[in-house]
């Protein structure tokens, strides 16, 4: 049976999401290694949900995207990070959002789907990563999920709710990067640059030469609570 245009786009987006997750596995391991933490990749949520019924599978897929295990480690005589114990300290999970669409100067955070909380507001992942593969600089936003929820629920963002998604049933927070970045870092977020990758041609997208101006006015200038470093274990 021939796929509809919507089905084709859905499958393309799904494949794109898996590609970005595979990139983030490598990025996360290397990032935490540079900070002195040894993480090993365990699985994605699809693997954990594979034998579940549809209802439980749907809930499991909301919990996280990627799971890692943290080991005790130290630098050896050559300056390499090595594991010192076989027993893991803890599991660490990540929610990954990748944005491949037009450079509007904004970030979009899903708030509700069919009047139910969604996105970062339902994930059980320890960390949330927002990846912008088309940008050459500052293309990874990484923060503890709890800190991001607290930040997004501040009154200053309420004017930026916007409907979108299939049949207009998804409610999103649309926030200008220009006014969000400093707030994000003040909340403990890490704004990083990731460069060692090439976007596959089948996704039919290219990187932006430069950022365009925002579509929305800057948000009201209100004070923000200072959060603890989200990478402190």
Image (tube, helix red, strand yellow):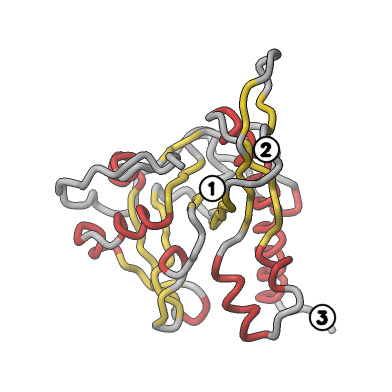
Element at label 1: strand
Q: Position of residue 151 (x, y in %)?
A: 30, 54
Q: Are marks 2 and 1 in contact (CB under 8 Å)?
A: no
Q: Nearer the viewer, mark 2 or mark 3?
A: 2
Residue of label 1: 131
Q: Nearer the viewer, mark 1 or mark 3?
A: 1
Residue of label 3: 2
Q: CA distance from mark 2 to mark 3?
A: 53 Å
Q: Sort mark 3 into few (<14), some (14-19) or many (20+) by Cα contacts within 10 Å.
A: few
Q: Earlier in the sequence, mark 1 or mark 3?
A: 3
Residue 74 picture quarter: top right
Residue located farthest toward the right when viewing the structure as drawn: 1
Q: Position of residue 6 (x, y in %)?
A: 66, 75
Residue 85 circle label: 2
Q: Residue at x 52, y 33 (%)?
A: 193
Element at label 2: loop
Q: Are marks 1 and 3 in contact (CB under 8 Å)?
A: no
Q: Earlier in the sequence, mark 2 or mark 1?
A: 2
């Amino acid at each position: 049976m021939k796929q509809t245009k919507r089905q084709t786009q859905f499958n393309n987006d799904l494949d794109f999401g898996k590609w970005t997750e595979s990139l983030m596995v490598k990025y996360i391991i290397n990032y935490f290694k540079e900070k002195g933490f040894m993480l090993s990749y365990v699985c994605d949520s699809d693997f954990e949900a594979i034998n579940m019924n549809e209802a439980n599978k749907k809930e499991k897929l909301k919990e996280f995207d990627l799971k890692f295990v943290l080991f005790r480690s130290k630098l050896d005589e050559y300056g390499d990070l090595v594991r010192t114990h076989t027993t893991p300290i803890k599991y660490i999970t990540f929610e990954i959002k990748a944005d491949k669409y037009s450079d509007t100067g904004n970030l979009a955070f899903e708030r509700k789907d069919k009047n139910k909380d969604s996105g970062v507001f339902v994930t059980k992942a320890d960390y949330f990563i927002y990846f912008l593969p088309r940008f050459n600089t500052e293309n990874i936003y990484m923060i503890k999920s709890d800190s991001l929820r607290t930040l997004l629920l501040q009154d200053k963002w309420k004017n930026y709710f916007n409907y979108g998604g299939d049949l207009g049933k998804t409610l999103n927070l649309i926030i200008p990067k220009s006014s969000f970045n400093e707030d994000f870092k003040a909340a403990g977020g890490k704004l990083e640059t990731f460069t060692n990758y090439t976007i596959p041609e089948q996704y039919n997208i290219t990187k932006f030469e430069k950022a365009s101006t925002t579509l929305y006015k800057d948000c009201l200038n209100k004070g923000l609570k200072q959060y603890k470093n989200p990478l402190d274990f």
